[in-house]
Every structure is written in structure tokens, then in C-alpha cells.
């Protein structure tokens, strides 16, 4: 229950689970090898706080609000930590783990595109679906592989005998084998639907027009009561057989026949597995009883349920197990019920979420319920106005505490030489609450600012307290590095890059403009680029600031010749982009444009976008641009509560932070320097392909 600290708190493990439901029968837990005594006398702790901004850290350290970080810095120092191209979490944390640039580890963005169909997809995991006998009996496991290249420092160190504990570090799903180590996976570990966190919202005051999928990760359902009783369904994972039929149609390309579109719509309508439930409304008491999975749970208005165990029946042989919580938001004149994303259950996940496989379940036995979802905070319901700021903040601290209790459990175990633990609540609170610190933001609200203007500071101070608790438990002589992957910027205005490409003649449209894209299109088998004339399109934008060329010999309908023509196009586009100014006041929107060959090198260079746009503070590519949309208008106010960001900004002004209790040998550390620093600290030979340099 929430009072016991065991509560649940959503563009990219998205779509993963749709290929993996057969794992319910096919995955067996394994214990993994036991570790003997360590051969190393030294220990190292690395605590990561996603998105922690160096300017905020410096300010609050100066004001005496971060005493534990200040104490570390007095022994070693506090520095901006140079991030990656692009300053996105998957890219930066992959470089943190491997010590190499994205050209060597292959993680450029949350999304990648299929060069045959141009369809966007998750940019961190490659999946092969399961097979079934008679379309019923599972005969093979799904295959999940991280597309991340390079070698994690905990693997290299582990082969040399260094014992490690790696906890909820982004880009560690699916979990890899860690020699002499253990791992609890982080982002992009999905929910039961295979997304980054699909919430559900049921209400009597929803109109039929509002029902359906929200833009960024929610399912809205209208409740109709007969007397005091209403029946509803919780949407679960897609049926893998139906999903495979959907994928077969989508692979035909961006332009589908009317027959294909009709079949696609029919399949999408039946693809999801559901769990039914009943709501009994006690209006007088402002309460409701939810009957689900054989349980009867009474909630009063404003109360969270305990974790609810859920079983989704794919067929008579295959079942998936998850867990969720409910919040009765309103039970007065209207009834509003929020249901969290359905997390994997730690002791019975449909896919391995740890190494050894039994590790997640062992944590569950000791600690009770904890969130497994990689994106553990409720950013999406707040962004969609289905949750208020107080509820979001209360839930965010529960998410923080869930991560913290896992890390502290392993700190106390002391069976490690290097411990790496990452908490991402620092990132999520800035995404959602920055608007209340920025009077220039379109979503600034003075009344809300009076109540929640210190929300970011509160989370930083909680992080500082956590650092202090870890140091207290390990003692003052253990080396500690506190790192973040990037900083933050206010996002006041959104920029439609594809619309700009259309206006400049680099992208050509035909036919009618399709409707806005949603995350559900990405994860549910929707269509994209329907109105693009690829025979006349030279460039297209997708992801957070990436511009790809429609290259002949690479893209299936490519028209731009590699070599001189592509080089000329890169120079031309770069120059024009740098002249893009805010029509309202003339402010330059784009600070820098980086060409692929100037910033990346390595075996995965061919997968990088030709151009990486680096925005100025205040501007970010629109949500529609990330999914390849080209709605009307180029620059417009950001009226979403997701009010700050880092992806797509110029990396040179988006550094993370490094706090060390050991002196380092430079004043300009980079995130790619962390991996070789760990290896040198333990006397392990640094591989020759690593781009970073040791800080010690």
C-alpha cells in the first residue's frame, strides 16, 4: 500500500511485448553463477540522476540546499559533464556504459526508421516474434536483442574479476549477461502493452468524442452506470498472432491500398487482450468498490489501491502476469478512476528483466512490490490533463523511493566492487514542472507556481538526501561519482521541422493531410507518411531533431545520390536551417546543425541521420515531428505541461553534471569518460576502441 512505500508511481520499449507474450510458458527462471570473494580492495559507487542540470546544482549548492553533494565536491569537485549528440537519454547513457560515440554503439534517438517502409520504430531493441503451431500452441520464444553496440564497462570489468551491481541504468533492457555481476534492467523496460507506460482513465464525464487514445500514451474510456453499477475493461497486451498480421500489412510500405487499410482497421480493433472489471459507486460516501480478478477493493475519493495482481489470457495455454494500481480521483457528482500502466510483476515477468533471471524476484521477496516499468513516473496523465500536479508529485516521490530502496538493498549487500544505480525522477519532474519556474512559458500559472514552483528543487534535495544516505552506509573512504546524462532547457515553442521541409521544397506532399499522429499509432500498428510523395522528397525529419536524406540505394524510394549530391544537400540545408528565426521576435531557433560525418565515427555510422539539429533554449521539435508529421504552421506555443526538454537541443549547452569525491585530471569531463575511468580504477586494460579518457 502507498503508506508502506510499496506503491506504483510511458517515445521506448514500445511495441516490445507484442512479440513476447509466449514467454509466459517458455521462460524459466535461472539462478546464475554465485560470486566468490572479491579480489579487489577498492570500491566505487556511481549514482546517476537523469537530467540533473549543472546550473541548478551549482545554484542550490551555493545556497546550502545540497549539503551532501557539496561535501563530495569539496573532496573532488563539481563539473559540467559534456553530453552526446543528440543529448537524449538513450544516446547518453549508452555512451556512459560503453565509453564510445553513437557511431560505435548505434543508439542515436528513441526512434529509428525502417529504410524500406520509412515506418518509425523503437530505437533500442530488435525483436523477432514467437511462432505458434496451428496458430495456438507456442513453439518458439520471441527473440529480443538490444541494438546497442559497444561493450559495457561492467562486462569488460567483470571478465577481469570485478564484481558489479547494475541497477535501473537506461538502455539495459533486455538485460545482458554480466560476468561476476547482477543487473536489474531499466529503460526501455516496457509495460504489459509493450509501451513506455500506457495509463487508463475511466470517467462518467467523458464525451464519446474524447474516448480513445490520447496523443501521448493514454486510453480514455467513458463510464455508463446502470444505477450504481458500471462495467469496464482494462486494456492489456496485443495478441501476438493478430499483431503479426498487422505488421505484415504495415511492411507493404507507407502507401496502402483501400483493402489493406480496411483490414488493418479491423485487426487493430481486435488486437488487444482485456481484463473485465466492475465498479460499484457509493455516491453518498464518495467511494467506490472495484471488483477485478476475484478481488473486491473499496476506495474512497483520493485513495490509491494496493498493487493488484492481473492475469491476461492470450489463449488457454498462454497467460501474462502484471500488476497495477488504481486511484479513485473523484466519486462525488462524477466518477473518475485512474489506472496506472500495468507493470511486469517482478517475480513472474513475461520476459527476463534481470540478470540472473531470478534476481528481480529475489528483490521482490525482500522488498515487496516495486515498479519495474522503465519510465516509472506519471508524466503522460499529467500532460494529458488527467492528473493534477499534487497527485503527480506525490506519485513521483513514490517512484523515486522505489528505485532508492532497490539501490540501498544492494548497497547493504556489499557483494560488489562497483555499484551503479540510476534514478530518473530528476528528469521527469523537470519535463513537467519547469513551466512553473519560467514566467515566460505559455503554461506558466502564478497560482500553481505558488504551490509547486519548488517542485524541481524538492526532488533535487531528495536526491541529495539519498546521496548522503548512500555515503553514510558505505563510509567516507569509498570513491563516489554522481553523474547525469544531460541538462535541461525550457520548451516554450514547438517547431514543425517536416512542415518547414515541405515549405522549402525538400519534402513533397500529395493528397489530403492525414490527422495528427499518436503514440498508439507507433505501438499499435498505425500508418505513417501516407501523403508523402517519395519520388520527389529529398529529406525528412523524424525523432528528436534528426533529418534524414532520402538516399538512393539506401531508402527504398531514395532519390538523392550518395557522395557529391548528398554533400551539397547537407551544406544547403544546414545553411538554411540556421536562418530559421522565430516569426514573433526574430530569435534564432536553431543554434547549430551538425553533419553526420563530423560528429560520429564507427561501424554503425550508416544508421545515423545526415543532420542533427541543435535547438536554442526555448525551442524544441514538435511531438508531431518526432513521428514524421507535418501539420500546418512551423512555430507555435507549447501549451502542454511537458514544458522542458533536452533532446534536440544543442549538445554544447546541454551538459550534464559530475560530482566526485576524488580529484579528476581535467576541468572538461565528458560522459564518454566514465567507462574508461572505471576500468582504470580497477586496473583493467582499457579497450583500444574506447573514445573516452580516464578521469583518474
Image: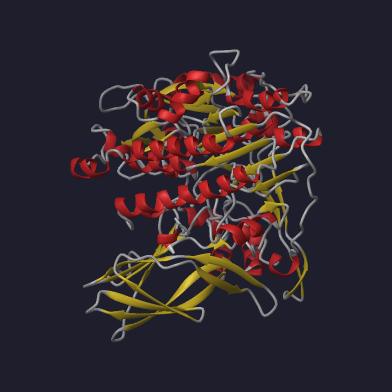
- The reply, left or right, for residue 53 in relation to residue 303 is right
Q: Nearer the viewer, residue 671 or 469?
A: 469
Residue 600's place in the image compared with 551, above or below, is above
Q: How many numbered circles does the render carry?
A: 0
- List x then y, in percent, for residue 58: 39, 23
The single residue placed furthest to the top in the displayed view is: 666
Q: Quadrant of residue 534?
A: top right
The single residue placed furthest to the left in the displayed view is: 447
- List x then y, in percent, for residue 55: 39, 24
- Report the quarter where the C terminus lies: top right
Q: Nearer the viewer, residue 695 or 36?
A: 36
- The reply, left or right, for residue 544 in relation to residue 241 is left
The structure's colour scheme is: secondary structure
User: From where the camera sits, is residue 581 visible?
Assistant: yes
Q: Nearer the viewer, residue 303 or 477?
A: 477
Residue 211's place in the image compared with 256, above or below, is below
User: From where the camera sits, is residue 379 visible?
Assistant: no
- Report the quarter where the N terminus lies: bottom left
- Rendered residue at 51%/46% (across/down): 404
- Rendered residue at 67%/69% (across/down): 241
- The reply, left or right, for residue 310 in relation to residue 141 is left
Residue 376's place in the image compared with 611, above or below, is below
- List x then y, in percent, for residue 207: 29, 68
- Rendered residue at 64%/21% (across/down): 597
Q: Quadrant of residue 338?
A: bottom left
- List x then y, in percent, for residue 70: 44, 24
Amino acid at each position: 500500500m502507498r503508506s508502506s512505500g510499496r506503491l506504483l508511481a510511458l517515445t521506448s520499449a514500445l511495441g516490445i511485448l507484442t512479440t513476447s507474450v509466449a514467454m509466459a510458458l517458455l521462460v524459466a527462471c535461472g539462478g546464475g553463477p554465485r560470486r566468490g570473494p572479491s579480489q579487489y580492495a577498492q570500491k566505487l559507487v556511481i549514482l546517476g540522476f537523469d537530467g540533473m542540470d549543472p546550473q541548478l546544482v551549482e545554484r542550490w549548492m551555493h545556497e546550502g540546499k545540497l549539503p551532501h553533494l557539496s561535501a563530495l565536491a569539496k573532496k573532488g569537485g563539481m563539473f559540467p559533464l559534456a553530453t552526446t549528440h543528440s543529448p537524449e537519454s538513450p544516446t547518453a547513457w549508452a555512451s556512459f556504459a560503453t565509453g564510445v560515440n553513437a557511431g560505435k554503439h548505434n543508439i542515436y534517438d528513441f526512434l529509428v526508421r525502417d529504410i524500406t517502409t520509412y515506418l518509425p520504430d523503437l530505437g533500442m531493441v530488435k525483436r523477432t516474434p514467437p511462432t505458434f503451431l496451428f496458430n495456438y500452441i507456442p513453439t518458439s520464444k520471441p527473440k529480443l536483442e538490444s541494438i546497442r553496440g559497444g561493450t559495457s564497462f561492467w562486462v569488460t570489468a567483470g571478465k577481469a574479476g570485478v564484481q558489479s551491481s547494475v541497477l535501473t541504468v537506461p538502455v539495459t533492457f533486455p538485460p545482458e549477461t554480466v560476468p561476476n555481476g547482477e543487473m536489474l534492467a531499466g529503460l526501455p523496460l516496457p509495460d504489459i502493452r509493450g509501451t513506455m507506460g500506457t495509463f487508463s482513465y475511466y470517467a462518467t464525464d467523458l464525451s464519446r468524442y474524447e474516448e480513445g487514445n490520447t496523443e501521448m500514451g493514454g486510453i480514455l474510456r467513458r463510464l455508463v452506470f446502470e444505477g450504481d453499477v458500471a462495467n469496464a475493461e482494462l486494456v492489456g497486451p496485443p495478441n501476438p498472432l493478430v499483431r503479426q498480421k498487422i505488421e505484415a500489412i504495415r511492411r507493404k510500405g507507407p502507401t496502402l491500398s483501400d483493402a489493406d487499410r480496411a483490414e488493418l482497421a479491423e485487426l487493430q480493433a481486435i488486437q488487444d487482450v482485456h481484463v473485465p472489471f466492475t465498479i460499484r459507486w457509493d455516491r453518498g460516501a464518495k467511494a467506490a468498490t472495484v471488483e477485478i480478478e476475484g478481488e473486491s477493493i473499496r476506495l474512497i475519493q483520493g485513495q490509491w489501491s494496493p498493487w493488484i495482481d492481473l492475469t491476461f489470457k492470450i489463449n488457454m495455454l498462454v497467460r501474462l502476469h502484471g500488476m497495477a494500481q488504481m486511484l479513485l480521483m473523484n466519486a462525488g457528482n462524477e466518477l473518475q478512476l485512474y489506472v496506472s500502466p500495468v507493470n511486469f510483476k517482478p517475480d513472474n515477468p513475461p520476459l527476463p528483466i534481470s540478470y540472473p533471471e531470478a534476481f528481480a524476484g529475489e528483490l521482490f521477496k525482500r522488498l515487496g512490490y516495486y515498479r519495474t516499468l522503465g519510465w516509472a513516473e506519471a508524466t503522460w496523465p499529467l500532460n494529458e490533463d488527467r492528473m493534477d500536479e499534487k497527485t503527480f508529485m506525490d506519485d513521483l516521490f513514490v517512484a523515486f523511493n522505489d528505485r532508492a530502496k532497490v539501490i540501498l538493498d544492494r548497497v547493504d549487500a556489499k557483494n560488489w566492487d562497483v555499484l551503479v544505480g540510476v534514478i530518473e525522477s530528476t528528469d521527469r519532474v523537470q519535463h513537467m514542472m519547469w513551466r512553473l519556474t519560467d514566467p515566460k512559458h505559455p503554461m506558466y500559472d502564478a497560482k500553481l507556481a505558488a504551490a509547486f514552483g519548488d517542485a524541481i528543487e524538492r526532488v533535487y534535495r531528495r536526491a541529495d538526501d539519498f546521496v548522503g544516505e548512500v555515503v553514510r552506509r558505505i563510509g567516507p573512504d569509498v570513491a563516489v561519482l554522481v553523474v547525469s546524462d544531460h541538462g535541461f532547457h525550457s520548451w516554450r515553442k514547438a517547431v514543425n521541422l517536416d512542415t518547414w521541409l515541405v515549405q522549402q521544397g525538400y519534402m513533397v506532399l500529395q493528397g489530403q493531410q492525414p490527422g495528427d499522429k499518436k503514440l498508439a499509432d507507433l505501438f499499435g500498428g498505425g500508418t505513417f507518411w501516407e501523403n508523402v510523395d517519395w519520388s520527389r522528397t529529398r529529406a525528412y525529419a523524424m525523432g528528436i531533431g534528426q533529418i534524414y536524406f532520402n538516399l538512393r540505394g539506401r531508402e527504398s524510394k531514395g532519390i538523392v545520390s550518395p557522395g557529391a549530391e548528398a554533400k551539397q544537400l547537407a551544406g544547403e540545408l544546414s545553411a538554411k536551417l540556421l536562418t530559421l528565426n522565430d516569426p514573433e521576435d526574430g530569435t534564432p531557433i536553431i543554434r547549430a546543425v551538425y553533419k553526420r560525418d563530423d560528429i560520429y565515427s564507427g561501424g554503425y555510422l550508416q544508421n545515423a541521420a545526415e543532420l542533427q539539429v541543435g535547438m536554442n533554449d526555448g525551442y524544441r521539435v514538435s511531438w508531431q515531428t518526432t513521428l514524421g508529421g507535418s501539420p500546418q504552421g512551423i512555430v507555435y506555443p507549447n501549451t502542454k505541461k511537458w514544458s522542458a526538454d533536452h533532446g534536440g537541443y544543442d549538445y554544447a549547452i546541454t551538459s550534464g553534471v559530475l560530482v566526485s569525491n576524488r580529484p579528476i585530471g581535467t576541468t572538461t569531463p565528458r560522459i564518454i569518460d566514465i567507462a574508461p575511468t572505471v576500468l582504470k580504477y580497477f586496473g583493467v586494460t582499457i579497450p583500444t576502441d574506447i573514445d573516452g579518457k580516464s578521469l583518474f
